[in-house]
Amino acid sequence: MTFLVDLVASGTVPAPRRLDVSLCLVFAADRLADGLLADADRAAAESRLPTAAPWAQEVYQAVGTGLSTLLARWNTEPPAMQYVLACLPALYPQHGRQIAQQVSALTPAYAGTRHGAYPRLADALVNEDDERAVVIASDIVSWEDGLDPGWLEAPGISAAMKTGHVLAEGVTQTAEAST
């Protein structure tokens, strides 16, 4: 994972390839939430907290370690890349704060569109507004095929983790449909 982060952060790879790799990083970082959500119902039935595979935590940490380097490129990246980059700090609250203004500034460019729901969700997450994030994520799962509304009801998982999963899965799915 660190190799992929370094590859994108170097800026030496053409923008379309950086975009592809960045989508892979979003998908990889979300495996932790995916694992927790997959275990949530069973964990509740067994009166324990949900767990994910150890490798999912390792991947999450590996992507998070290089995130500051990636985000330092924000102002040099084209809008499509910024759109995807906005998702990564939303999955990492400690990094999200450093780029919250840039993510917020991105949202008007997509106002009034379904694609605009994802930057708005990222904005809510980087600003740690769980209530707004749940409202936006609920709207997204009502119209985006392939996203499970049950994710938002999963027991034992934070609102930020659940709505971050909606963000990551939705952006990844939307990007795949666009290519």
Image (cartoon, rainbow, N blue to C red):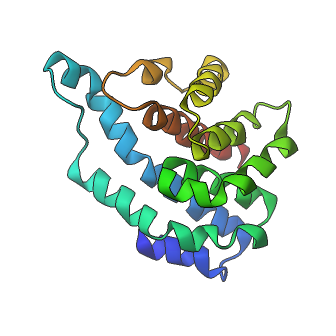
In the rendered image, the vertical position of residue 39 relative to residue 17, given as above or below: above
In the rendered image, the vertical position of residue 78 relative to residue 73, given as above or below: above
Residue 24 visible in the snapshot: no
In the rendered image, the vertical position of residue 36 relative to residue 5, given as above or below: above
State the quadrant of the N terminus. Answer: bottom left
Residue 48 visible in the snapshot: yes
Left or right side of 75 for 88? left
Residue 56 pos. (x, y %): 31, 51
Residue 156 pos. (x, y %): 30, 26
Extreme-left residue of the structure: 46
Residue at 44% x, 46% y: name it: 30
Residue 103 pos. (x, y %): 71, 51
Residue 36 image-quadrant placement: top left
Residue at 58% x, 41% y: name it: 125
Left or right side of 109 for 28? left
Residue 76 image-quadrant placement: bottom right
Residue at 44% x, 62% y: name it: 64
Residue 146 image-quadrant placement: top right
Residue at 31% x, 39% y: name it: 35
Residue 8 pos. (x, y %): 59, 73
User: Observer-nearest residue: 155 or 78?
Assistant: 155
Left or right side of 155 for 18? right
Q: How many marks?
A: 0
User: Observer-nearest residue: 144 or 71?
Assistant: 71
